[in-house]
Image (cartoon, rainbow, N blue to C red):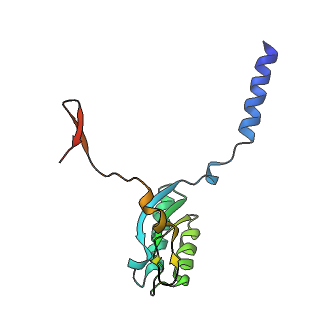
Amino acid sequence: MKRMLATVLFVLLVVCLSAIPASEYLIGAYSQYQMRYMGSDFGTKYEALGAYLQNAGFNATSYSVVRDTDFDDAKLGEAMRRLNANNVKTLLQDLSWQNDNGEIGLMALSFGNRLQIEAEYKLSEGTFVVDA
C-alpha cells in the first residue's frame, strides 16, 4: 500500500513539474475591430484594445482585414506591434475577396462553411419555436 501511494505521489509530482504555464495557452477574445474602419489613428485604437484585453486577462484577440486598394501592409504590422506591446497575440481573419487579381482570403472562402445561429428559442408544447 505504501509503495502504491508513493508511486501515485511521484506521478503527480512529475505531472505538476512538467505542466506548461497557463501563459502559453491562448485565452482570446473575439473583436469586432476591422482595419478598414479604424481611420487614421488606428494605432492608438489597437494599443487601447491591447491594454483592455491584457487588463481583462486575455492574451489573444481575433480581428479581420480586407485586402483592398486602401489596405497597407504597414497598418497590419503596426496593429500587431501595438497588440504585442501588451502581450496580446493576433488571430487574423482575412476576409479579402478580389477575384480579378487572385487575392482571396482564407476566411472569405470558409465563411459560409460554419454554422452560426443567433436566435432565441423557447419550448412550446413540446417543440422548440423561435421566440419573437
Task: Say left or right for 70 vs 14.
Answer: left
The residue at 54%/60% (across/down) is 60
The residue at 77%/35% (across/down) is 14
Front residue of this view, candidates 65 and 16: 65
Q: In the image, is residue 74 above or below residue 89?
A: below
Residue 53 in the image: x percent, y percent?
A: 48, 61
Front residue of this view, candidates 109 and 123: 109
Residue projecting furthest to the top: 1
Residue projecting furthest to the right: 3
Residue 96 in the image: x percent, y percent?
A: 47, 75
Task: Say left or right for 116 vs 93.
Answer: left
Residue 31 in the image: x percent, y percent?
A: 43, 63
* Image quadrant where one finds the N terminus: top right
Instruction: Please identify the quarter of the rendering in which residue 129 is found.
Output: top left
Front residue of this view, candidates 103 and 86: 103
The residue at 70%/43% (across/down) is 19
Residue projecting furthest to the front: 100
Q: In the image, is residue 108 above or below residue 121?
A: below
Residue projecting furthest to the bottom: 69
Residue 49 in the image: x percent, y percent?
A: 45, 67
Instruction: Please identify the quarter of the rendering in which residue 91 is found.
Output: bottom right
